[in-house]
Image: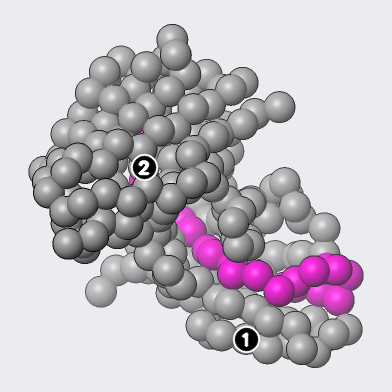
Amino acid sequence: SQKIEQNSEALNIQEGKTATLTCNYTNYSPAYLQWYRQDPGRGPVFLLLIRENEKEKRKERLKVTFDTTLKQSLFHITASQPADSATYLCALNSGYALNFGKGTSLLVTP
Amino acid sequence: DGGITQSPKYLFRKEGQNVTLSCEQNLNHDAMYWYRQDPGQGLRLIYYSQIVNDFQKGDIAEGYSVSREKKESFPLTVTSAQKNPTAFYLCASSLTGQSLNTEAFFGQGTRLTVV
């Protein structure tokens, strides 16, 4: 069966450091992968989309890598800030809708 | 303001009652989706619609029903047949359902509690 796995343990880092979150998947052949941010009690918000032929994509302090051989995406937040504290979700298309991982909670402390 | 609106934000239902959650979008998107989120769980797909007047069951459709009579509206009814309806419900839309090479826009969610 198709699976999207994200580290279920919360990631706690100090302000200014780089946060790295992992998304692994099985039984998908994705043309692209998406990352979303979700704050408590709110709907997810789209952050980045990376295509299979793109190894890396950047947007401001965010960087995403996509390795279709390893079936893995890494999501980096550089110079992290307390405002970056949230849950980050990885998503892949199943052909008719997006399937999401359970998300990784990030806490950035001052 | 363009966006996707869910209402109400909080909803309480007595056991045995049906309840309908509203989802409206003014983004002119063809595709709309309903997800359910439980604590510690990811988003699970309930129903999706790729075009008006058409919808399909997702992974956990039992006990739910939908309609798509208008492009901008995709209401979800939680029926009494749904055994564990207490959850956070999220509606989303995307430009097209056939090619999902676009982002999904989510509403603010409806938190349903059975009392």
Q: Report the quarter where the N terminus of chain B lies.
A: bottom left
Residue B111 as seen in the image, left or right of residue A46: right
Residue range highlighted in magenta: B77-103
Q: Residue furthest top?
A: A69
Residue A55 as seen in the image, left or right of residue A94: left
Q: Is residue B95 visible?
A: no
Between residues A96 and A34, which one lies in front from this camera angle? Answer: A34
Q: Position of residue A45 (x, y in %)?
A: 35, 57
- Dot 1 crowding, Cα within 10 Å, few <14, some 14–19, many 20+: some
Q: As displayed, is residue A11 above or below residue B93?
A: above
Q: Position of residue A88 (x, y in %)?
A: 39, 49
Please tell me which residue is depicted at 46% across the width and 56% down the height of the picture. B93
Residue B102 highlighted magenta (yes or no): yes
Magenta highlight: main SS = loop
Residue A72: numbered disc: none
Residue A100 as seen in the image, left or right of residue B108: right
* Residue type beneath disc 1: Leu
Question: Element at badge 1?
Answer: strand
Question: Which residue carries the number 2 mark?
Answer: A35
Q: Report the quarter where the C terminus of chain B lies.
A: bottom right
Q: Chain of mark 2?
A: A
Location of residue A19 (image quadrant): top left
Tell me, yes or no, whether the two marked residues, 2 and 1, touch with CB atoms within 8 Å.
Answer: no
Please tell me which residue is depicted at 30% across the width and 36% down the height of the picture. A20
Between residues B28 and A58, which one lies in front from this camera angle? Answer: A58
Q: As displayed, is residue B71 above or below residue B103?
A: below
Question: Which residue carries the number 1 mark?
Answer: B11
